[in-house]
Amino acid sequence: AQTVTQSQPEMSVQEAETVTLSCTYDTSESDYYLFWYKQPPSRQMILVIRQEAYKQQNATENRFSVNFQKAAKSFSLKISDSQLGDAAMYFCAYNGYGAGNNRKLIWGLGTSLAVNP
Amino acid sequence: GAVVSQHPSWVICKSGTSVKIECRSLDFQATTMFWYRQFPKQSLMLMATSNEGSKATYEQGVEKDKFLINHASLTLSTLTVTSAHPEDSSFYICSARIQGAPGGYTFGSGTRLTVV
């Protein structure tokens, strides 16, 4: 079975600084997706970034980028130029290819990020 | 695009009563809907997966008779918490797989249920 591990329950960063959130996963599959979701105080789940495992290039979305190390099964999220609005819970999630629409997301426990002014 | 509208956003009910939570896909057909429960500062716990026109598949430990899930159409899935008790108080979130978007999911805004 697949697992996702986020070893940092809480993190903090100064506004305008850079922070990296860690995520490791375990799978025997070769093709899969990895996600970072943000859940702000409103509790609306927001997709931050997505990575397809077959792509060697790390995904980037504006100030958010990932360091995807497939062999090491590591998928960290880097937030550059942190803003107050980045304060939220961040969840790492895994989803395999195929098996139709019933394929469920496997979630990490989350990292609570605080941004200090 | 690919919006799931979840209602109500919050509800307070008395012990012993039932509460229905609705999730509607507004601009796409949600063949599959996932229902989650989330406790404060914790991760999402999958309760069940529902497919349009068929019975939901419940995760181990989730009471089928307490959490009734109906997915009668491609745009509507409902979760009914029957005979609610204070321990059912939680945050419930629905999520749909986005067809045509590999690995894509969209989430409802959640329902905060308080049972008094």
Image (cartoon, coloured by chain):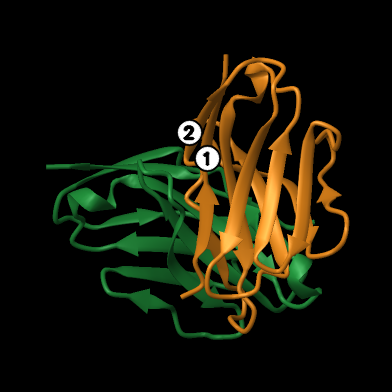
Chain colours: A green, B orange
Q: Which mark is residue A14?
A: none
Residue B37, x across and y down, in percent: 63, 39
Name the residue: 61% across, 49% down.
B22
Q: Is residue B16 left or right of residue A65?
A: right
Residue B29, x across and y down, in percent: 65, 74
Amino acid on which the number 2 mark rests in the picture: Lys
Residue A32, x across and y down, in percent: 66, 74
* Of pointers 1 and 2, the one earlier in the residue sequence: 2
In this picture, is A94 found above or below B11?
A: below
Name the residue: 72% across, 65% down.
B32
SS at circle 1: strand
Q: Residues within 10 Å of mark 2 (few under 14, many from 20)?
A: few
Q: Nearer the viewer, residue A34 or A7?
A: A34
Q: Is residue B36 left or right of residue B107?
A: right
Residue where numbered disc 1 is placed? B111
Residue A80, x across and y down, in percent: 24, 63
Residue where numbered disc 2 is placed? B41
Name the residue: 84% across, 64% down.
B53
Q: Nearer the viewer, residue A13 or B2?
A: B2
Name the residue: 74% across, 58% down.
A2
In this picture, is A106 found above or below B10?
A: below
Q: Which of label 1 and label 2 is nearer to you? A: 1
Q: Residues within 10 Å of mark 1 (few under 14, many from 20)?
A: many
